Image (cartoon, rainbow, N blue to C red):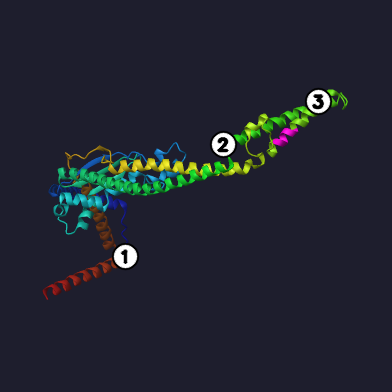
Amino acid sequence: MDVTRFTLWDYVRAVVNRRRLIFLNVIGVMIISISVSWMMPKWYKARALILPPEEQGNLAGLIGNTGLAGIAATAGSFALPVLASESDVMATMLKSRTVLDAVIDSFDLTKVYEATTRESTRLRMLYNLNVDVGSDGVIKLEYMDKDSIRCAAIANALIKSMDWVRSELSVQRARETRMFVQQKLAETEEDIAKAEDSLTAFQRKYKIIAPEVQATATIQAAANLRAEMILKEIELDALRATHSENHPNVILIENAIAKISEKITELESGLVGLSDSSAQYLSIPFSNVPDLTLKYGQLVRNLKIHETVFQVLTQQLEQAKIQETRETPTVSVLDWAVPPAYKFKPKKARIGLTAGFLALIATLLWIFLKELWLSQRLANNDAYRNLLSISNTLKRDFFGFRGRKVREDDD
Protein backbone atom coordinates (compact mmCIF):
# COMPACT_ATOMS: atom_id res chain seq x y z
CA MET A 1 0.00 0.00 0.00
CA ASP A 2 1.45 3.33 -1.09
CA VAL A 3 1.83 6.06 1.48
CA THR A 4 0.52 9.45 0.38
CA ARG A 5 2.41 12.33 1.93
CA PHE A 6 0.84 15.75 2.38
CA THR A 7 3.40 18.42 1.41
CA LEU A 8 3.49 22.17 1.49
CA TRP A 9 2.93 22.39 -2.24
CA ASP A 10 -0.20 20.32 -1.87
CA TYR A 11 -1.49 22.83 0.63
CA VAL A 12 -0.57 25.81 -1.60
CA ARG A 13 -2.28 24.18 -4.56
CA ALA A 14 -5.40 23.58 -2.44
CA VAL A 15 -5.44 27.22 -1.32
CA VAL A 16 -5.12 28.44 -4.92
CA ASN A 17 -7.89 26.11 -6.05
CA ARG A 18 -10.19 27.45 -3.34
CA ARG A 19 -9.22 31.13 -3.78
CA ARG A 20 -12.78 32.10 -4.67
CA LEU A 21 -14.09 30.46 -1.48
CA ILE A 22 -11.49 32.29 0.57
CA PHE A 23 -12.33 35.61 -1.06
CA LEU A 24 -16.08 35.16 -0.60
CA ASN A 25 -15.68 34.10 3.03
CA VAL A 26 -13.49 37.09 3.91
CA ILE A 27 -15.66 39.62 2.09
CA GLY A 28 -18.86 38.10 3.44
CA VAL A 29 -17.64 38.15 7.04
CA MET A 30 -16.43 41.73 6.65
CA ILE A 31 -19.78 42.85 5.25
CA ILE A 32 -21.70 41.08 8.00
CA SER A 33 -19.46 42.47 10.77
CA ILE A 34 -19.71 46.01 9.41
CA SER A 35 -23.48 45.65 9.09
CA VAL A 36 -23.69 44.45 12.69
CA SER A 37 -21.50 47.37 13.83
CA TRP A 38 -23.96 49.79 12.21
CA MET A 39 -26.67 48.38 14.48
CA MET A 40 -24.52 48.60 17.61
CA PRO A 41 -25.13 51.60 19.89
CA LYS A 42 -22.73 54.51 19.55
CA TRP A 43 -20.46 55.35 22.47
CA TYR A 44 -18.90 58.74 23.12
CA LYS A 45 -15.89 59.61 25.27
CA ALA A 46 -15.37 62.96 26.98
CA ARG A 47 -11.98 63.97 28.35
CA ALA A 48 -10.87 66.47 31.00
CA LEU A 49 -7.41 67.46 32.19
CA ILE A 50 -6.67 68.34 35.82
CA LEU A 51 -3.47 70.14 36.80
CA PRO A 52 -1.34 68.82 39.68
CA PRO A 53 -2.42 70.33 43.01
CA GLU A 54 -0.38 73.30 44.15
CA GLU A 55 1.54 73.19 47.39
CA GLN A 56 -0.74 74.66 50.01
CA GLY A 57 0.61 76.73 52.83
CA ASN A 58 1.25 74.58 55.85
CA LEU A 59 2.98 74.69 59.18
CA ALA A 60 6.40 74.15 57.65
CA GLY A 61 5.91 77.14 55.33
CA LEU A 62 4.95 79.43 58.15
CA ILE A 63 7.89 78.56 60.40
CA GLY A 64 10.50 78.08 57.70
CA ASN A 65 12.68 80.76 59.29
CA THR A 66 12.52 79.37 62.81
CA GLY A 67 14.59 76.26 62.19
CA LEU A 68 11.67 73.92 62.95
CA ALA A 69 10.43 73.46 59.41
CA GLY A 70 11.80 69.95 59.19
CA ILE A 71 9.83 68.87 62.26
CA ALA A 72 6.60 70.60 61.29
CA ALA A 73 6.62 69.63 57.63
CA THR A 74 4.30 66.71 58.26
CA ALA A 75 1.68 68.67 60.16
CA GLY A 76 -0.13 70.23 57.21
CA SER A 77 -0.73 67.42 54.74
CA PHE A 78 -1.35 63.71 54.32
CA ALA A 79 1.51 61.31 54.95
CA LEU A 80 2.08 59.82 51.51
CA PRO A 81 4.24 56.88 50.45
CA VAL A 82 7.56 57.66 48.86
CA LEU A 83 6.41 56.98 45.29
CA ALA A 84 2.94 58.48 45.67
CA SER A 85 1.93 62.06 44.92
CA GLU A 86 -1.08 64.30 45.46
CA SER A 87 -2.09 63.57 41.86
CA ASP A 88 -2.24 59.86 42.68
CA VAL A 89 -4.45 60.63 45.69
CA MET A 90 -6.79 62.71 43.53
CA ALA A 91 -6.98 59.93 40.95
CA THR A 92 -7.98 57.48 43.69
CA MET A 93 -10.57 59.91 45.04
CA LEU A 94 -12.19 60.16 41.59
CA LYS A 95 -12.94 56.43 41.84
CA SER A 96 -14.04 56.49 45.46
CA ARG A 97 -17.52 55.50 46.60
CA THR A 98 -18.22 58.97 48.04
CA VAL A 99 -17.50 60.74 44.75
CA LEU A 100 -19.32 58.18 42.61
CA ASP A 101 -22.43 58.16 44.81
CA ALA A 102 -22.71 61.94 44.61
CA VAL A 103 -22.70 61.77 40.79
CA ILE A 104 -25.11 58.81 40.77
CA ASP A 105 -27.62 60.78 42.83
CA SER A 106 -27.13 63.90 40.72
CA PHE A 107 -27.89 62.18 37.40
CA ASP A 108 -30.06 59.34 38.73
CA LEU A 109 -27.69 56.93 36.97
CA THR A 110 -29.20 53.86 38.59
CA LYS A 111 -32.29 54.48 36.49
CA VAL A 112 -30.37 55.68 33.42
CA TYR A 113 -28.19 52.55 33.33
CA GLU A 114 -31.15 50.33 34.28
CA ALA A 115 -29.15 48.90 37.17
CA THR A 116 -30.73 46.91 39.96
CA THR A 117 -28.49 48.14 42.79
CA ARG A 118 -26.28 51.10 43.56
CA GLU A 119 -23.27 48.79 43.66
CA SER A 120 -23.89 47.64 40.09
CA THR A 121 -24.23 51.29 39.05
CA ARG A 122 -20.83 52.04 40.58
CA LEU A 123 -19.31 49.10 38.73
CA ARG A 124 -20.82 50.37 35.49
CA MET A 125 -19.36 53.83 36.11
CA LEU A 126 -15.93 52.42 36.94
CA TYR A 127 -16.04 50.42 33.70
CA ASN A 128 -16.80 53.59 31.73
CA LEU A 129 -14.30 55.70 33.71
CA ASN A 130 -10.59 55.93 33.00
CA VAL A 131 -8.24 58.01 35.15
CA ASP A 132 -4.58 58.24 34.31
CA VAL A 133 -1.79 60.25 35.99
CA GLY A 134 0.95 61.40 33.61
CA SER A 135 4.63 61.68 34.40
CA ASP A 136 4.16 65.46 34.74
CA GLY A 137 1.44 64.98 37.36
CA VAL A 138 -1.44 66.04 35.06
CA ILE A 139 -4.53 63.88 35.58
CA LYS A 140 -6.43 62.75 32.49
CA LEU A 141 -10.05 61.81 33.14
CA GLU A 142 -12.08 60.05 30.44
CA TYR A 143 -15.69 58.93 30.66
CA MET A 144 -17.74 56.96 28.12
CA ASP A 145 -21.48 57.06 27.64
CA LYS A 146 -24.02 56.53 24.91
CA ASP A 147 -25.06 60.18 25.20
CA SER A 148 -22.39 62.69 24.14
CA ILE A 149 -23.77 65.49 26.32
CA ARG A 150 -24.21 63.26 29.35
CA CYS A 151 -20.69 61.81 29.20
CA ALA A 152 -19.20 65.33 29.35
CA ALA A 153 -21.56 66.34 32.14
CA ILE A 154 -20.68 63.25 34.20
CA ALA A 155 -16.94 63.84 33.70
CA ASN A 156 -17.27 67.42 34.95
CA ALA A 157 -19.50 66.30 37.81
CA LEU A 158 -16.86 63.81 38.94
CA ILE A 159 -14.29 66.61 39.12
CA LYS A 160 -16.62 68.88 41.08
CA SER A 161 -17.58 66.09 43.45
CA MET A 162 -13.92 65.26 44.08
CA ASP A 163 -13.18 68.94 44.67
CA TRP A 164 -16.02 69.12 47.20
CA VAL A 165 -14.72 66.06 49.04
CA ARG A 166 -11.20 67.53 49.15
CA SER A 167 -12.58 70.80 50.51
CA GLU A 168 -14.57 69.02 53.20
CA LEU A 169 -11.56 66.98 54.25
CA SER A 170 -9.42 70.12 54.33
CA VAL A 171 -11.96 71.96 56.49
CA GLN A 172 -12.26 68.98 58.81
CA ARG A 173 -8.49 68.76 59.25
CA ALA A 174 -8.30 72.50 59.82
CA ARG A 175 -11.05 72.32 62.45
CA GLU A 176 -9.33 69.50 64.30
CA THR A 177 -6.00 71.33 64.06
CA ARG A 178 -7.52 74.54 65.42
CA MET A 179 -9.00 72.78 68.43
CA PHE A 180 -5.75 70.98 69.16
CA VAL A 181 -3.62 74.11 68.73
CA GLN A 182 -5.87 76.17 70.97
CA GLN A 183 -5.47 73.61 73.74
CA LYS A 184 -1.70 73.48 73.33
CA LEU A 185 -1.51 77.27 73.15
CA ALA A 186 -3.16 77.63 76.55
CA GLU A 187 -0.75 75.07 78.03
CA THR A 188 2.22 76.87 76.49
CA GLU A 189 1.16 80.18 78.00
CA GLU A 190 1.24 78.58 81.44
CA ASP A 191 4.67 77.09 80.73
CA ILE A 192 6.00 80.51 79.67
CA ALA A 193 4.76 82.12 82.89
CA LYS A 194 6.44 79.40 84.98
CA ALA A 195 9.72 79.70 83.03
CA GLU A 196 9.76 83.49 83.45
CA ASP A 197 9.18 83.22 87.20
CA SER A 198 11.99 80.67 87.57
CA LEU A 199 14.45 82.85 85.61
CA THR A 200 13.57 86.00 87.58
CA ALA A 201 13.97 84.20 90.93
CA PHE A 202 17.40 82.87 89.88
CA GLN A 203 18.62 86.32 88.81
CA ARG A 204 17.47 87.91 92.05
CA LYS A 205 19.08 85.21 94.18
CA TYR A 206 22.54 85.34 92.56
CA LYS A 207 22.41 88.96 91.28
CA ILE A 208 23.10 87.82 87.72
CA ILE A 209 22.22 89.86 84.66
CA ALA A 210 24.10 88.21 81.80
CA PRO A 211 26.48 85.48 82.97
CA GLU A 212 27.49 84.59 79.41
CA VAL A 213 28.79 88.10 78.78
CA GLN A 214 30.40 88.32 82.18
CA ALA A 215 32.09 84.94 81.87
CA THR A 216 33.29 85.69 78.34
CA ALA A 217 34.79 89.02 79.37
CA THR A 218 36.45 87.46 82.42
CA ILE A 219 37.91 84.58 80.44
CA GLN A 220 39.17 87.03 77.85
CA ALA A 221 40.79 89.16 80.57
CA ALA A 222 42.50 86.12 82.07
CA ALA A 223 43.68 85.02 78.64
CA ASN A 224 45.16 88.46 77.97
CA LEU A 225 46.98 88.38 81.31
CA ARG A 226 48.39 84.91 80.61
CA ALA A 227 49.53 86.00 77.15
CA GLU A 228 51.21 89.04 78.68
CA MET A 229 52.88 86.82 81.31
CA ILE A 230 54.19 84.47 78.61
CA LEU A 231 55.70 87.39 76.74
CA LYS A 232 57.35 88.64 79.94
CA GLU A 233 58.73 85.14 80.62
CA ILE A 234 60.23 85.01 77.13
CA GLU A 235 61.76 88.44 77.64
CA LEU A 236 63.11 87.32 81.03
CA ASP A 237 64.75 84.24 79.50
CA ALA A 238 66.39 86.39 76.88
CA LEU A 239 67.77 88.83 79.53
CA ARG A 240 69.08 85.98 81.70
CA ALA A 241 71.12 84.77 78.78
CA THR A 242 73.12 88.02 78.75
CA HIS A 243 72.63 89.52 82.23
CA SER A 244 73.01 88.36 85.79
CA GLU A 245 70.15 87.66 88.19
CA ASN A 246 70.78 90.93 90.01
CA HIS A 247 70.48 93.08 86.95
CA PRO A 248 67.80 95.79 87.40
CA ASN A 249 65.98 94.84 84.19
CA VAL A 250 65.81 91.20 85.23
CA ILE A 251 64.43 92.13 88.64
CA LEU A 252 61.92 94.52 87.03
CA ILE A 253 60.56 91.86 84.71
CA GLU A 254 60.39 89.29 87.53
CA ASN A 255 58.30 91.73 89.57
CA ALA A 256 55.99 92.33 86.59
CA ILE A 257 55.51 88.60 86.13
CA ALA A 258 54.68 88.24 89.83
CA LYS A 259 52.04 90.98 89.62
CA ILE A 260 50.47 89.42 86.53
CA SER A 261 50.34 86.02 88.26
CA GLU A 262 48.70 87.63 91.27
CA LYS A 263 46.02 89.19 89.09
CA ILE A 264 45.35 85.84 87.41
CA THR A 265 44.98 84.19 90.82
CA GLU A 266 42.55 86.90 91.93
CA LEU A 267 40.46 86.42 88.77
CA GLU A 268 40.29 82.67 89.22
CA SER A 269 39.45 82.92 92.91
CA GLY A 270 36.98 85.78 92.56
CA LEU A 271 38.96 88.05 94.92
CA VAL A 272 39.35 90.97 92.54
CA GLY A 273 39.32 94.29 94.36
CA LEU A 274 36.89 97.03 93.51
CA SER A 275 39.75 99.30 92.48
CA ASP A 276 40.97 96.76 89.97
CA SER A 277 39.95 97.49 86.38
CA SER A 278 39.11 93.85 85.82
CA ALA A 279 36.33 93.98 88.42
CA GLN A 280 33.96 95.35 85.80
CA TYR A 281 33.94 91.94 84.16
CA LEU A 282 32.95 89.91 87.20
CA SER A 283 30.47 90.39 90.02
CA ILE A 284 30.53 86.75 91.16
CA PRO A 285 33.44 84.46 92.05
CA PHE A 286 35.13 83.13 88.96
CA SER A 287 35.10 79.61 90.40
CA ASN A 288 31.27 79.66 90.48
CA VAL A 289 30.80 80.96 86.99
CA PRO A 290 30.49 77.55 85.20
CA ASP A 291 27.72 76.23 87.44
CA LEU A 292 25.81 79.49 87.50
CA THR A 293 26.21 79.98 83.77
CA LEU A 294 24.97 76.45 83.11
CA LYS A 295 21.92 76.91 85.31
CA TYR A 296 21.19 80.32 83.85
CA GLY A 297 21.55 78.92 80.30
CA GLN A 298 19.14 76.09 81.08
CA LEU A 299 16.53 78.52 82.39
CA VAL A 300 16.92 80.84 79.41
CA ARG A 301 16.83 77.94 76.99
CA ASN A 302 13.65 76.61 78.58
CA LEU A 303 12.03 80.03 78.27
CA LYS A 304 13.09 80.43 74.61
CA ILE A 305 11.74 76.99 73.75
CA HIS A 306 8.33 77.84 75.19
CA GLU A 307 8.35 81.22 73.43
CA THR A 308 9.24 79.61 70.08
CA VAL A 309 6.53 77.00 70.52
CA PHE A 310 4.07 79.76 71.39
CA GLN A 311 5.00 81.67 68.22
CA VAL A 312 4.66 78.58 66.04
CA LEU A 313 1.32 77.60 67.58
CA THR A 314 -0.01 81.14 67.12
CA GLN A 315 0.88 81.07 63.43
CA GLN A 316 -0.62 77.61 63.01
CA LEU A 317 -3.81 78.70 64.76
CA GLU A 318 -4.26 81.60 62.35
CA GLN A 319 -3.63 79.34 59.39
CA ALA A 320 -6.13 76.77 60.67
CA LYS A 321 -8.76 79.50 61.08
CA ILE A 322 -8.20 80.67 57.50
CA GLN A 323 -8.24 77.11 56.17
CA GLU A 324 -11.42 76.35 58.06
CA THR A 325 -13.32 79.23 56.49
CA ARG A 326 -11.90 79.16 52.96
CA GLU A 327 -14.24 78.17 50.14
CA THR A 328 -11.87 78.38 47.18
CA PRO A 329 -11.60 75.37 44.84
CA THR A 330 -8.84 72.89 45.63
CA VAL A 331 -8.62 71.57 42.05
CA SER A 332 -7.21 73.42 39.03
CA VAL A 333 -8.82 72.20 35.80
CA LEU A 334 -6.83 72.72 32.61
CA ASP A 335 -9.56 71.43 30.27
CA TRP A 336 -13.16 70.87 31.29
CA ALA A 337 -14.92 68.06 29.44
CA VAL A 338 -16.98 69.09 26.41
CA PRO A 339 -19.50 66.98 24.47
CA PRO A 340 -17.50 65.03 21.85
CA ALA A 341 -18.40 65.65 18.22
CA TYR A 342 -17.54 62.14 17.07
CA LYS A 343 -18.30 58.73 18.48
CA PHE A 344 -15.56 56.74 20.20
CA LYS A 345 -16.86 53.31 19.27
CA PRO A 346 -17.81 51.10 17.51
CA LYS A 347 -15.01 51.57 14.98
CA LYS A 348 -16.52 50.00 11.87
CA ALA A 349 -13.34 49.86 9.80
CA ARG A 350 -11.37 48.19 12.59
CA ILE A 351 -14.18 45.72 13.25
CA GLY A 352 -14.42 44.85 9.54
CA LEU A 353 -10.68 44.39 9.10
CA THR A 354 -10.37 42.32 12.25
CA ALA A 355 -13.30 40.11 11.28
CA GLY A 356 -11.89 39.68 7.75
CA PHE A 357 -8.49 38.71 9.08
CA LEU A 358 -9.99 36.16 11.46
CA ALA A 359 -12.13 34.79 8.63
CA LEU A 360 -9.01 34.42 6.47
CA ILE A 361 -7.16 32.55 9.21
CA ALA A 362 -10.16 30.30 9.89
CA THR A 363 -10.63 29.49 6.19
CA LEU A 364 -6.95 28.69 5.70
CA LEU A 365 -7.01 26.46 8.76
CA TRP A 366 -10.13 24.68 7.47
CA ILE A 367 -8.48 24.10 4.10
CA PHE A 368 -5.36 22.74 5.79
CA LEU A 369 -7.32 20.32 7.98
CA LYS A 370 -9.52 19.22 5.07
CA GLU A 371 -6.53 18.50 2.83
CA LEU A 372 -4.76 16.72 5.64
CA TRP A 373 -7.82 14.55 6.20
CA LEU A 374 -8.16 13.74 2.50
CA SER A 375 -4.50 12.82 2.22
CA GLN A 376 -4.74 10.51 5.22
CA ARG A 377 -7.94 8.93 3.87
CA LEU A 378 -6.31 8.19 0.54
CA ALA A 379 -3.35 6.69 2.31
CA ASN A 380 -5.67 4.62 4.56
CA ASN A 381 -2.86 4.23 7.07
CA ASP A 382 -2.89 3.80 10.80
CA ALA A 383 -3.07 7.54 11.40
CA TYR A 384 -6.24 7.81 9.30
CA ARG A 385 -7.89 4.87 11.03
CA ASN A 386 -7.07 6.30 14.43
CA LEU A 387 -8.47 9.70 13.45
CA LEU A 388 -11.60 8.05 12.05
CA SER A 389 -12.12 6.10 15.26
CA ILE A 390 -11.77 9.24 17.37
CA SER A 391 -14.16 11.12 15.06
CA ASN A 392 -16.81 8.41 15.24
CA THR A 393 -16.55 8.24 19.02
CA LEU A 394 -17.02 12.00 19.35
CA LYS A 395 -19.99 11.91 16.94
CA ARG A 396 -21.70 9.16 18.94
CA ASP A 397 -21.16 11.08 22.18
CA PHE A 398 -22.45 14.28 20.65
CA PHE A 399 -25.54 12.84 19.03
CA GLY A 400 -26.19 10.68 22.06
CA PHE A 401 -26.08 13.75 24.29
CA ARG A 402 -28.45 15.58 21.96
CA GLY A 403 -30.84 12.62 22.00
CA ARG A 404 -30.89 12.53 25.81
CA LYS A 405 -31.40 16.29 25.90
CA VAL A 406 -34.37 16.08 23.54
CA ARG A 407 -35.96 13.28 25.57
CA GLU A 408 -35.53 15.24 28.79
CA ASP A 409 -37.15 18.29 27.20
CA ASP A 410 -40.07 16.17 26.00
CA ASP A 411 -40.57 14.69 29.46
Residue on which the image places disc 3: 252
Labelled disc at residue 383:
1
Front-lying residue, 136 or 328: 328
For marks 2 and 1, give the one nearer the viewer.
2
The magenta segment is: 261-266
Where's the C terminus, which quadrant? Answer: bottom left
Q: Which residue is drawn at 16% across and 45% down?
A: 150
Residue 18 can be seen in this image: no
What is the count of numbered marks? 3
For marks 3 and 1, give the one nearer the viewer.
3
Question: At label 2, which amino acid type do we have?
Answer: Ala
* Callout 2: SS: loop
Q: Which residue lies furthest to the front in this view?
A: 274
* Callout 1: SS: helix
Where's the N terminus, which quadrant? Answer: bottom left
Q: What is the magenta segment's predominant secondary structure?
A: helix
Residue 114 can be seen in this image: yes
Which image quadrant is residue 287 in? top right
Q: In this view, does 265 lie to the left or right of 86?
A: right
Q: Which residue lies furthest to the left in this view?
A: 410
Circles 3 and 2 in contact, beta carbons < 8 Å: no
Question: At label 3, which amino acid type do we have?
Answer: Leu
Q: Is residue 228 left or right of residue 8?
A: right
Front-lying residue, 83 or 177: 177
Front-lying residue, 335 or 130: 335
Residue on which the image places disc 2: 210
